[in-house]
Image (spheres, rainbow, N blue to C red):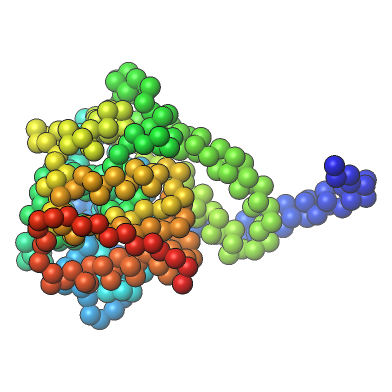
Amino acid sequence: MIHFSPDQIAAELRSFTDKLAQGAKTLGELGEIETGVSPRDPVYQEDKLTLYRYQPRVAELHPVPLLIVYALVNRPYMMDLQEDRSLIRGLLDAGIDVYLIDWGYPDADDRHLNLADYVHRYLGHCVDVLREQRRLAAINLLGVCQGGALSLCFTALYPEKIRNLVTMVTPVDFHTPDNLLTHLIRHVDIDLLVDSLGNLPGQMLNFAFVSLSPFRLAGQKYVDVVDILDDAQALKNFLRMEKWIFDSPDQAGEAFRQFAKDFFQQNKLVKNEVIIGGCRVDLQKITMPVLNVYASQDHLVPPAASKALAGCCGSGDYSELCFRGGHIGIYVSGRAQQEVPPAIAAWLLARLDAPKKKGRKTTKRHQVRNP
């Protein structure tokens, strides 16, 4: 048992008080906490949605654009958080022509939007805009988390429009034993929730996510931040992350109802039983090359939930990329910047002229290691 003398306790309290005083001064001088650092231009808008094209950073671009589909939960600037923590900037530096869907902030007028609106209409229109602008039959698609599940649905329904598919920390099997989020949602009366609230408040979902790791996300990090209160840059980085965590859009009621019931509660995606706009989602129709990127320490989307895609899709060119880190670290850690964007870009480049493979499916698993 460790014992502290009164002098040691007094010194510790003085140090803590000094840090808080310095922190107040630092906070007062920080200014606005900006979100998203890479220049981009809107190229299409519909309702709350905006489709952006990121300004290229190299002269020679990959000829097939890459459309990023982020989750409906939280905001996509996590992928472009700051100059040295930006998956999007890494893709741009590798010569990828990057587009991204910003879903915006649903309000009461959007409570009746369903998955058909998001998959057939919004995502479909964005894909068609790029196909028409670039005069291409098919484009590349990168789906992230829930956006990856939506991308799988779209690709299965419109396989002729997608040339290569990349999924990132994407749940496919929602009933793996270690899926804590499913255990949390499985016994919720979703119909009563949506009928009572209309749109699901973003704060409610955010509370659910934080509750999966309460000590780290709701306690320890605020104790640790005291040690960086005198470092303006480190504090700004911390606040960027905090701003993203609590920037949670409300969820359109009907879309949330179907996603929660069909995906989380009934696990229909992995069973090929999801029906969107009267059309059944059959993952076996995903026959183009697929790169499935997952995080080995992901507490929101366990690796097994993502790796289930290997046995579900019909691709003859299926690869996996394992990042040693967590659900957020795969975007913002220093190692992620060195490993993930170059790997995605190299995978796309290798399939620039490769014909679609048919026949017997093969699975290639690439373990990402420290450089």
Tell me, yes or no, if residue 121 can be seen here.
no
Side (left or right) of 214 relative to 74 = right
The x and y percentages for residue 202 are 40, 36
Q: Tell me how many marks there are.
A: 0
Tell me, yes or no, if residue 150 can be seen here.
yes
The x and y percentages for residue 65 are 19, 65
- Residue that appears at 34% across and 43% down: 305
Side (left or right) of 32 relative to 16 = left
Residue reaching furthest to the front? 360
Q: Quadrant of residue 18?
A: bottom right
Q: Is residue 324 above or below residue 216?
A: below
Q: Is residue 246 above or below residue 358?
A: above
The x and y percentages for residue 288 are 14, 57
- Residue 148 or residue 56, whichever sits in front: 148
Quadrant in which the N terminus is drawn = top right
The x and y percentages for residue 364 are 27, 60
- Residue 183 or residue 218, whichever sits in front: 183
- Residue that appears at 11% across and 47% down: 285
Residue reaching furthest to the bottom? 59
Side (left or right) of 355 relative to 300 = left
- Residue that appears at 53% across and 39% down: 213
Side (left or right) of 33 relative to 79 = right
- Residue that appears at 35% across and 30% down: 200
Residue reaching furthest to the right? 6
Q: Quadrant of residue 252?
A: top left
